Image (cartoon, grey):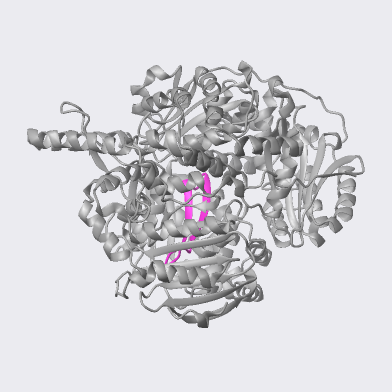
Amino acid sequence: METKRLQAYELMQEQELKGIQSKGYLLRHKKSGARIVLIENEDENKVFSVGFRTPPQDSTGLPHILEHSVLCGSREFPAKDPFVELVKGSLNTFLNAMTYPDKTVYPVASCNDQDFQNLMHVYMDAVFYPNIYENDKTFRQEGWSYELEDEDGELKYNGVVYNEMKGAFSSPDGVLDRMILNSLFPDTSYSNESGGDPDEIPSLTYEDFLDFHRKYYHPSNSYLYLYGDMDMEAKLTWLDEHYLSRFDCAWIDSEIKMQKPFEHPVEWKRYYSISNTETEEMNTYLSYNKVVGTSLDEKLYLAFSILDYALLSAPGAPLKKALTDAGIGHDILGSYENGICQPIFSVIAKNAEESQKDAFIQVIESTLTRLVKEGIDPDALAAGIHYHEFRYREADFGSYPKGLMYGLQMLDSWLYDEKRPFLHLDALDTFAFLKEQIGTSYYEDLIQEYLLDNTHASIVMICPKKGMAAEADRKIQKRLQDYKRSLSREEVEKLVKDTKELRAYQEEPTPPEILEKIPVLKVSDISEEAAPVYNEERKAGDVTCICHPIETNGIGYLTMIFDLRTLTEEEIPYAGLLQAVLGIIDTEHYEYGKLFHEINRRTGGIETSLEMYTDVTKVKEKEFRPTFEIKAKALYAELPFALSMMEEILMRSVLSDEKRLKEILEMLKSRLQMKFLSAGHSSAVLRAMSYHSPAARFKDMTNGIEYYETVSRIADHFDEEKGRLVSILTELCKKIFRKEWMIVSYTGAKESFDAVLAGIAAFSGRLWKEKVKEGGFLLTCTKKNEGFQTASKVQYVAMAGNFIDAGMEYHGALQILKVIMGYEYLWQNIRVKGGAYGCMSSFNRLGEGYFASYRDPHLKNTLDIYQGVTDYLRNFAVSDRDMTKFIIGTISNMDQPMTPAVKGDRSMNLYMNHVTKEMMEQERREVLHATQQDIRNLAGIVEQVLREDQVCVIGNEEKIEQDREVFTEIKALF
């Protein structure tokens, strides 16, 4: 890039970033003072972000509410929700915004040049010229407002962020994270909750909200980032001419202040709510927390990630093992938070007792003292370094563009020192340094200095309290009633008027001429060809191996797939337990901690999972193929070793270790509880579908609510259950891990195939051969319509059904329906007007359909909104431009960039489900050429799904009781 031609900018730094095959530039915009980083490379998945330092001064959630609000209309794009309009009609690969404890970031990504430019334009206009100054309606919708339907009605609070944070504060894990941060930084902005404490959000005023934007959303306080293969000069010229040159440099005090170290550790005790049916015994969270230097120390930044692995995160790690052996907590977790100015290292014991606090501290400190004296296991350190370096080099972030993740990581240094944006991006030298320190006292010295001798520390306990959420709700209701009683008649009338005006504003459609200002691509720009499928059927001895010839930069991705259709119904949940146990229990040749280290020292990891496939050509039969899968990834030269370790796990695990089995069960129970509270919508959907779908019931039995019930039963009655557990798990291994039930998936370069196939053939010959009793299950389904009560302040509301059973057929337009629901009908009614944080729907080739809400203050009202979908579709009528947007938004979901591993997984999924490339292209054509009549024709499909009335709700115990007529059964989840 020729920076000399860019007169508006000053080049501050230029650097080769070998570790990520890129070149980095740090610039400063001369007139406005804006900071800009460019990362130039050949990645077509381009990323842009604009971010600001936004230290919160209180816990009203101002940064979070502003993040939501600036995307609700701006000077050049005055539509009420340009963010949603973009999602509908953009080929984006990422489009969102995020609030952190000290920054707010607005990133976008796209592979399409024009789309990328459009996204940049809308986001720059949103942050610098939002419509929030025109009236307070966006603030009231996204943040908080009083809601009063009529003069005699009940006064309530509503608002998207308000309800989102009610859900976040319902999770004990979320409460603990906040208390740890607040306890260690009482004199800085980290003592405040940037997301917003629901008790404090209603004290935020509209004027303070505007003042925050005036102060912090200025180019002089901004961090602009461009990544990928693009004309950087053209982008910089555009940024200057359209936005940055309009501002003069200003001094803005947004510095993230450093907390002065404590002279003595502090202790905090706080409470979280549990439902009336939960026990307070063994439900306390204990945490031991230390501040570790600053994030500007690149060696410390990574070294403590390695120590987190070696001390806590790896199975059998010494701190985890010492606490478990001492009976302190049922789930021991490590946490290293290095995305803030002063990183935090934490040791957490879940499901402990408050009385164990002193023993908790003593075990941690005595174990650390012993490790300093005797030395840390060098294999654990080597494994931890290889684990992190492998992921750094692989740069596979799943569905997230790697340019996005690099940009966020860059802020871990750039935000605190504007001259050091590349500190953590080029990490190869740091990894080399850390390897050299194995065998020295480096890591032991870090433990002594930062964990044992460091007084900048806190012990945080959060203890359970029954009925706390209900009591908090009663206090809020009383506060609102008292406030309403204090108002004059005129003031009450104004609240009613304001509520109606906000509702009218939300319901009023944006005029077409305003919507047309938001740029939209053309359908003609999109190919009708589906993404390639990479399947070559080969043989490895007697075993079928589906090879996916893809260039993977020297990494092989290997998956062994074993059919589970020979299981009995009784064995199904135990298959879930077997999957959870294998790999973290002793084998004949390795103690489980050593096994884990050995794997991570030489590979990119080995993991197990249960999956499911359905022949889409036989959906009416409801047959499905459940599988047990073990996956490994490694450099080609290490694949023989990976195979040997897969064999060790499958064939030689010591399943009679009762002590270890009990530990795993307690950990599983804890992790499932976390999942239900943080992602209850997916569990509610799965449960609702299990009332009718045998495949969904299988998933629920192995990873959902029915599975949790099995895990809890065995864990709570372990002495009575252990013999049977060991017997079933042992028998399952012999029944499952057999050559005749096996198929293999392998992704890698073609030249690596022969060696892998030979290894698989030898591997398969050593699998179980002895005869076992085979079963074969036929799962029955029963409609239950359950309400699962928790101490949460919000709900996850799911409704599901099947349309193929009624003789209807799948059509590609159902993919468009998902976009229409998620960003039009459900969005407007459940999120915008209802105040829920999220809403979603899905309809698949199996005929399964569902609607769901996330962190929703409502229950019955949400179900009524689902019922309204049919009429909405029958009367569906939009402009041709809107229809084009829905189509493009759908194609965007279908055309997300794929890593080599994802390309292989997708190809294998299509093979296993019998989905041909022709089917994919037919679906694509049905999407690209869909008409409004095609959407109206979906009304019958949706009507059939809704008619089945399969409902499951996870949420507030009082709300579920209040709407009990919805349910056949009401029960406590925990």
Residue 118 screen position, x and y as percent: 48, 56
Name the one closer to the observer, 971 or 283: 971
Residue 263 screen position, x and y as percent: 33, 70
The image shows residue 527, relative to residue 246, as above or below, that is above
Q: How many numbered callouts?
A: 0
Q: Residue at (36%, 77%) from the top-left corner?
A: 31
Residue 915 screen position, x and y as percent: 73, 35
Q: Residue at (62%, 20%) from the top-left corner?
A: 808
Residue 716 screen position, x and y as percent: 54, 32
Q: Residue at (80%, 25%) from the top-left corner?
A: 774
Q: Is residue 612 magenta?
A: no
The image shows residue 460, relative to residue 921, as above or below, that is below
Determine whether, in the image, residue 456 is placed left or right of residue 472: right
Name the one closer to the observer, 411 or 345: 411
The image shows residue 242, relative to residue 8, as above or below, that is above
Name the one closer to the observer, 102 or 371: 102
Q: Main secondary structure of the magenta part?
A: strand
Residue 755 lies in quadrant:
bottom right
- Bounds of the magenta segment: 328-350
Q: Residue at (39%, 42%) from the top-left corner?
A: 512
Q: Is residue 387 visible?
A: yes
Determine whether, in the image, residue 161 is placed left or right of residue 570: left
Q: Residue furthest right?
A: 541
Q: Quadrant of the N terminus?
A: bottom right
The image shows residue 878, relative to residue 412, as above or below, that is above
Q: Is residue 454 visible?
A: no
Residue 601 lies in quadrant:
bottom right
Q: Is residue 341 magenta?
A: yes
